[in-house]
Image (cartoon, grey):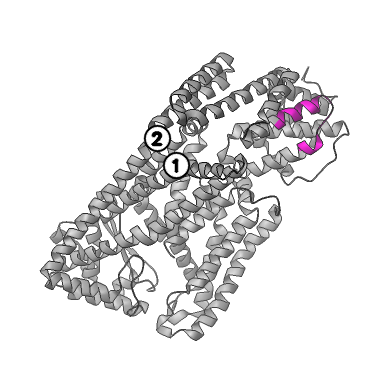
Amino acid sequence: MEILSPIVVVLLVQFGKYPSGIWWQPDAGISLVAALGAPIAAALLTYVGMRGWRRRTPRTERVREPFILYGLHHGLLAALLLGTEWVATVQDWTRDLPGLVDIVALLPWLAMRVAHGQVLWTLDQAGAHGGWTRRRAAGAQLQVTLLSLAPMLLINALRELVLWVPAWRGLLSAYEPLTALGSALLLTPFFFVVSPLVIRWILRAKPLPAGETRSRLLELSSRVKFGPSQILRWDTNGTIPNAFFIGLLPGLRYVVLTDAILERLRPADLDAVYAHEIGHGARRHLLCFMVVATAFGLWTAALAEHGQSFFLNLASGLGLSPKESSLVAEIGVYASLALMILGFILGAFGWISRRFETEADLFAVQALGAPAPIQHALEEIGLHLGILRRKGGLRHFGIGQRIGLMNRWLHEPEFRAQFNRLMKRVRWMIVIMFVLGVGVSALGWSKHWQTGQLLTSLNQARATRSPEALDTVLANAATLAETDEGYRVVHEALVDSALDMRAEWALESGDYSKAVELARKLGRSTDEVVQFNGERIRLLVEVLRGRPALETLRTLSWTLALWLRASRSFDRESIKETFSELYLADLAASRREQFVEVEWFARPRFERSELLTPLARVAAELEAGNAVKTSLISAAKAEAASFRHRGALFALAFPDFSFEGR
């Protein structure tokens, strides 16, 4: 569960960025109360659950918390992130800054884990927190939680940082499948390279002081001709007997030893633990895991891409409507990804990890010339954790089995040769997994490149407002669709986009009759965004003609507010312009006394200046009775001249206001 937990937690945040439906939309106040109450609820669950579990469990088996309690805490987090507006509230606070949304949204989870740790400190499980202050126990719990979350948070922050730059966002959006491939090939290795610095900072690990222990361990590294750039000490107040190796680059390779390991183990046992950890580095286990993680990223990207087409075709074959088919495809892809992640972690990752741990054990045996030190160290650690009689876990065989494997390797030449062959096959299997991942992803490279070029040309036509360039894009797409059936969907989408652009140009030029005619055609599209734009254009024309479609205004505002929850899936500038136009339409209809005020949950967000164009910001200031800056008036005047329909909406809303002479 420790490995699955960060994946589940971060995925919950990502799902929380999307609307949870119109049946339940609590406001920011309720969401904040829920976020503050989550740690209290987690503490109560821990207290009740642990008291009952302790009564039924032998004292030596109380080190690990019951699985059901861990699951309840994750369920509590899911209720907060998916059942309230907490993530949307955080998006408002953070202005969607890259990576910051995820971190702030997970503050309740960090508080829940700290509250959980505080209850355990109070109950003092098997003396595990003896000698700690509450503050130190809270800090340790925070460290462990951040250590598991840091990898995925860092990768998400890097991805969002790239998408935050408007020029990159448009380019990467055009080549979206290739972007996902590049993300898998670049971001995962980048994390493996810089993770030692992140982990060292989180743990506040310090270099092991000079002395007999450090000299002895460095001498061991010299003897086996492999060692870290630093040996670090992690202070856990003697509660966590652990050690691990991190880092790929020679200057960023660390062996981290906890204070419990350093203080509890005799010198020979500590040497064995150290030899085991540098064995991971010497046998390039981290490099192998990096390749495995990269390959897995390629496979998930391929599944997301090809799975969408598979489920769409399946749903269409069942006679479902386009909208229903799209929903089925989305659910099918997410379910497939979840099963793939679960199968990978419980299957391939666990299987490989256990063999690598055995290989590191055998490296220690070879480095020390005898199995006794590493075997005794394992028994000492197992005795402290109360797991001597436990079976193995996801990443390790049981202690008894590990000792048995070492003895077999030493005394059975046939087993030794068999194990060595197995490890060679494991490495070849990893390479093959990576090559196949690249191969599966490469199946659509040509199509993705051609599609990206078409979308880039479409964006250029939109920017230059050139009907001729638009016709050229459609002609090229039609030619590709005739030669390859796979481009048919791309051509249809481009036809909708071109129709949408022409309707926008007609609206902006003041040709309302043509805009309405084109908008009706947009309404027949199977794409919900295209349908939305068609309804929006018809609505704006109705308001300008003095016949506002009130129900349409309510529906469109509600829909756009829901989409704002997933703003990174849309062009922010487009969202700003659309919000501004609906806001101006609202004011224009209200001034004509033909609009009945309704409470939209998105209405307060209209006042966010970054979601309004200059003209709408002037309207917001006038509506609030504030003075308007000259620079803002100048920008609004230029906007009204470029977009005649917005200027007309503003004039209807504020008939006594004139830009002339200002």
| x then y, percent, for residue 101 | 55, 48
Judge whether 544 appears above or below 411 on screen: above
Q: Nearer the viewer, residue 347 or 88?
A: 347
The magenta stretch is: 535-553
Amino acid type at circle 1 is: His
Residue drawn 16% across the image and 63% down it: 418
Q: Which residue is mark 1?
A: 306
Res. 227 in view:
no
Res. 387 in view:
yes
Q: Earlier in the sequence, mark 1 or mark 2?
A: 1
Mark 2 and mark 1 in contact (Cβ < 8 Å)? yes
Is disc 2 placed on a helix, strand or loop?
loop
Q: Quadrant of residue 359?
A: bottom left
User: Is residue 239 left or right of 32 when viewed as pictured?
Assistant: left
| x then y, percent, for residue 222 | 15, 59
Q: Quadrant of residue 200?
A: bottom left
Q: Which residue is mark 2?
A: 444
Is disc 1 placed on a helix, strand or loop?
helix
Judge whether 74 appears above or below 182 on screen: below
Hey, which residue is sitting farthest right in the picture?
A: 593
Give the spatial CA distance, label 1 vs label 2: 9 Å
User: Is residue 367 left or right of 128 when viewed as pictured?
Assistant: left
Judge whether 656 appears above or below 214 on screen: above
